Amino acid sequence: MSYYQRHIFFCLNQRDGGEAACEQHGATAAFDHCKRRVKALGLAGPGQVRVNKAGCLDRCAGGPVAVVYPEGTWYTYVDNSDLDEIIDSHLKDGQVVERLVLPPDVGR
Ligand code: FES
């Protein structure tokens, strides 16, 4: 069994010069919301869920993006209700939120 049951990484990358980057779309606020909510729901910690910051994950065109392991499910999100759905459905219960899954051909 792995140390965490599920791990979500948020790209928080920021770029100068107008090139697409997740931080332009509120990635840090999303990360903070997710971290707070996972903790408030009692889901954080060993054997449960870990919420982590990441740099560029090289899928910037679909930003903001986050990826959940061990499933390797890539998400894009718009607002806190999208994040809540990912938390409640996937991080808590293992059910992928299909409507927020990043299409496989989205890259940088
Ligand atoms: S800036 Fe977020 S994936 Fe590249």
Image (cartoon, rainbow, N blue to C red):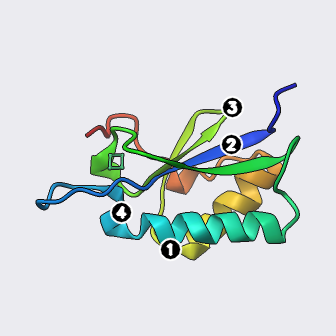
Q: Position of residue 90 (x, y in %)?
A: 72, 51
Q: Within 8 Å: ligand 1 and the Cβ of disc 4?
A: yes
Label 2 neighbourhood size at 10 Å, few (<14), some (14-19), many (20+)?
some
Q: For residue 81, what is the image quadrant?
A: bottom right
Helix, strand or loop status at disc 1 = loop
Which of pointers 4 and 1 lies earlier in the amino acid sequence?
A: 4
Which of pointers 4 and 2 lies earlier in the amino acid sequence?
A: 2
Helix, strand or loop status at disc 2 = strand
Amino acid tagged 4:
Glu
Residue at the extreme left of the image, as rendered: 17
Query: Are the two marked residues, 2 and 3, in contact with CB atoms closer than 8 angstroms?
Result: yes
Cα separation between marks 1 and 3? 24 Å
Q: Position of residue 10 (x, y in %)?
A: 51, 52
Cα separation between marks 2 and 3? 7 Å
Which of pointers 2 and 3 lies earlier in the amino acid sequence?
A: 2
Q: Within 8 Å: ligand 1 and the Cβ of disc 2?
A: no
Label 1 neighbourhood size at 10 Å, few (<14), some (14-19), many (20+)?
some
Q: Which residue is mark 3?
A: 70
Residue drawn at x 41%, y 45% is 55
* Residue 30 falls left or right of residue 97: left
Amino acid tagged 2:
His
Q: Is residue 101 placed above or below 85 in the rendered structure? A: above
Q: Position of residue 17 (x, y in %)?
A: 11, 59
Amino acid tagged 3:
Pro
In the picture, which quadrant includes the N terminus?
A: top right
Tag shown at residue 23 = 4
Amino acid tagged 1:
Asp
Q: Which residue is mark 2?
A: 7
The mark closer to the camera, 2 or 3, is: 2
The mark closer to the camera, 4 or 3, is: 4
Helix, strand or loop status at disc 4 = helix
Helix, strand or loop status at disc 3 = loop
